[in-house]
Image (cartoon, coloured by chain):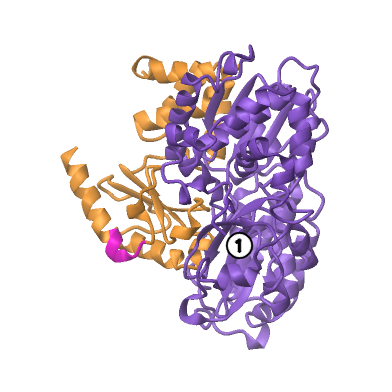
Chain colours: A orange, B purple
């Protein structure tokens, strides 16, 4: 249960706002972190913590793209393919990355559950294109990418995943 | 040149300015101390006198915005707009990563000026690491008495919190941002009431919403005075600005300079800045204000125009957030229109029909154009759809989504014509970077 395991973080979130409802976004992040994605059960849990109806919470999860209502891989790779990045070859990079992992636009998660690859709108790092974020984190290693750099990263993530 | 042409990207002149002790040794929090020694109305007057204009895109005078807040209301908020999501914009990230205390100080001065009861910094969800960094800085500032209870022993309490969005461009629009902060869908509100008014702001309380870069200017203005600030820039565009340079340039990045001190040509070609176009190609077009502003052809007149709010208007475009995307001579502008339209289709919040349906239809017809399967009349069709989206939506996103069509069709008609009718190249043909644009869902 989130309420026990993340009691401190949940309390910190509630303490920020005059209404419980405002904590719904931080709590959805906590749920996603715990369960990997926002299952109907996870959404119900957040709803009951915020005194909201699960339908309201589901509409929020659906509106914002950083909440995922389907299972995803351990490494969630989001490639920016917006205009500024695309001028630097981000579309081609995204397609190559999918191909490298045996994925396509519909099947975005590897069968072993290690990787999910998505293209996303502007990530505010247009000077570092092509680039991606991994599990919402940026790293200079993910900047100015080509497939050679990407293959090295994939290898690192694969061996890291095995250790876990 | 070395003398304070940089007010914001100070890490380039003073290493480790992100650290509290280094910041404090370099006038850090002096602006806040000075402000708290003044009456709130005097602080507002000083910022008004500086004519600082909002750096988020609209360019509205900051001091005037603050003066709209009714002082008699007991609960008031300052909300920092750190949702930076416009294609081609990455300046606020650099300020928050490298000079975070200057933002915190600026936000606290704004909060004193309107006697706010709390400050919220709304960051785009992707700035997860940036928010964690800010949280640490806020805690440090609280320990020093600059934030929180009894700020600088003035008897005034004002806590500061970060809040992460979750991937929605629309939340950069101030009323959608407030909705999102309240735990709702990020959809714009009907105005009036405006955020500054009772009933219109955060939790229905009077609220000032300011961009990160705007607030980061304020400590400097308090320490040095409005008169000194106005020595930078032009009469109508005072101060310095961070220019986000991306696209086809050798050295993309953030460059700060006084407004009006640089032309587009200097920014793109000078070694100190963009360093020219890869392959030494010619520049074909420039988007001075990211995906949402009007595109302009790179004529000599445009390239030699100083970068100010007023001069960009002369070119039929806007300076906006100064997110300058450069496109070289090989770029297919029809592809640019299709790309930017996918962005707006994805980011339309769905509340207003013209924007929700308009972006959908524009995207469909542009897909047809890019597949070289369109009719000549399709060019008029997209222009017509776009015109019908202008001025009829609750927020500016409808207009933003119309701009990429109206101005690309007007300024680069041949780029569209080559995709239609008998002259169309067959699919997969010549349209450079025209293929493989992934579907925006």
Which type of secondary structure does the marked residue at label 1 adopt?
A: strand
The percent coordinates of residue B266 (x first, y second) are: 60, 70
The percent coordinates of residue B423 (x first, y second) are: 64, 88
A82 drawn magenta: no
Left/right placement of residue A154 relative to residue A33 reads: left
A149 drawn magenta: yes
Helix, strand or loop: magenta stretch: helix
- Which quarter of the figure has residue B361? bottom right
The percent coordinates of residue A98 (x first, y second) are: 35, 60
- Which quarter of the figure has residue B115? top right
Against A113, residue B277 (above or below) is below
B412 and B323: which is toward the camera: B323
B179 and A15: which is toward the camera: A15
- Which quarter of the figure has residue B431? bottom right
Against B114, residue B320 (above or below) is below
- In the rendered image, is residue B316 in sight? yes
The percent coordinates of residue B265 (x first, y second) are: 62, 72
Please state, as top left, top right, bottom left or bottom right, where the N terminus of chain B lies in the image.
Answer: bottom right
Q: Residues within 10 Å of mark 1 (few under 14, many from 20)?
A: many
- In the rendered image, is residue A69 in sight? no
Chain that bears disc 1: B
Q: Which residues are magenta?
A: A145-150
Residue at 57% across / 20% down in the picture?
B159
Residue at 76% across / 44% down in the picture?
B51
Left/right placement of residue A93 relative to residue B74 reads: left
Residue tagged 1: B324
């Amino acid at each position: 249960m989130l309420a026990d395991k993340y009691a401190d973080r949940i309390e910190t979130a509630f303490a920020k706002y005059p209404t419980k409802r405002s904590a719904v976004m931080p709590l959805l992040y906590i749920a996603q972190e715990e369960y990997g994605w926002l299952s109907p059960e996870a959404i119900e849990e957040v709803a009951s913590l915020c005194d909201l109806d699960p339908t309201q919470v589901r509409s929020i999860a659906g509106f914002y793209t950083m909440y995922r209502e389907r299972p995803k891989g351990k490494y969630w790779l989001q490639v920016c393919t917006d205009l500024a990045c695309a001028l630097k070859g981000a579309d081609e990079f995204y397609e190559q990355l999918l191909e490298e992992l045996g994925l396509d636009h519909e099947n975005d998660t590897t069968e072993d559950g290690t990787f999910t690859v998505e293209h996303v709108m502007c990530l505010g790092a247009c000077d570092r294109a092509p680039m991606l974020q991994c599990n919402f984190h940026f790293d200079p290693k993910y900047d100015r990418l080509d497939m050679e750099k990407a293959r090295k990263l994939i290898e690192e993530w694969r061996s890291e995943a095995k250790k876990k | 040149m070395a003398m304070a042409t940089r007010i914001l990207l100070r890490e380039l002149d003073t290493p480790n300015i992100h650290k509290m002790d280094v910041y404090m040794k370099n006038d850090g929090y002096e602006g806040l101390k000075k402000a708290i020694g003044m009456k709130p109305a005097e602080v507002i007057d000083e910022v008004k006198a500086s004519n600082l204009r909002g750096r988020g895109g609209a360019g509205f005078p900051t001091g005037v915005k603050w003066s709209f807040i009714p002082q008699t209301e007991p609960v008031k908020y300052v909300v920092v707009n750190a949702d930076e999501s416009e294609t081609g914009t990455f300046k606020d990230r650099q300020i928050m990563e490298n000079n975070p205390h200057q933002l915190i100080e600026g936000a606290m001065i704004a909060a004193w000026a309107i006697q706010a009861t709390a400050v919220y910094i709304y960051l785009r969800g992707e700035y997860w690491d940036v928010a964690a960094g800010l949280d640490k800085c806020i805690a440090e500032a609280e320990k020093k008495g600059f934030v929180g209870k009894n700020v600088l022993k003035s008897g005034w309490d004002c806590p500061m919190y970060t809040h992460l969005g979750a991937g929605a461009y629309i939340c950069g629009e101030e009323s959608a941002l407030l909705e999102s902060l309240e735990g709702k869908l990020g959809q714009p509100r009907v105005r009036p009431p405006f955020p500054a008014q009772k009933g219109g702001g955060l939790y229905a309380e009077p609220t000032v919403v300011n961009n990160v870069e705007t607030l980061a200017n304020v400590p400097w203005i308090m320490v040095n005075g409005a008169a000194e600030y106005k020595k930078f820039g032009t009469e109508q565009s005072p101060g310095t600005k961070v220019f986000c340079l991306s696209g086809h340039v050798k050295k993309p990045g953030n460059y700060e300079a006084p407004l009006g001190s640089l032309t587009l040509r200097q920014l793109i070609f000078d070694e100190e800045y963009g360093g020219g176009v890869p392959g030494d190609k010619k520049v074909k077009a420039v988007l001075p204000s990211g995906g949402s502003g009007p595109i302009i052809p790179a004529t000599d007149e445009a390239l030699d125009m100083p970068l100010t709010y007023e001069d960009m208007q002369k070119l039929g475009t806007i300076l906006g957030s100064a997110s300058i995307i450069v496109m070289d001579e090989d770029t297919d502008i029809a592809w640019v229109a299709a790309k930017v339209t996918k962005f707006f289709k994805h980011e339309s919040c769905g509340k207003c029909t013209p924007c929700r349906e308009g972006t959908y239809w524009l995207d469909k017809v542009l897909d047809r154009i890019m597949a070289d399967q369109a009719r000549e009349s399709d060019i008029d069709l997209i222009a017509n759809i776009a015109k019908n989206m202008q001025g009829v939506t609750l927020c500016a996103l409808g207009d933003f989504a119309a701009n990429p069509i109206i101005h690309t069709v007007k300024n680069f008609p041949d780029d569209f014509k080559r995709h239609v009718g008998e002259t169309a190249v067959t699919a997969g043909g010549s349209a450079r970077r025209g293929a493989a644009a992934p579907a925006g869902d």
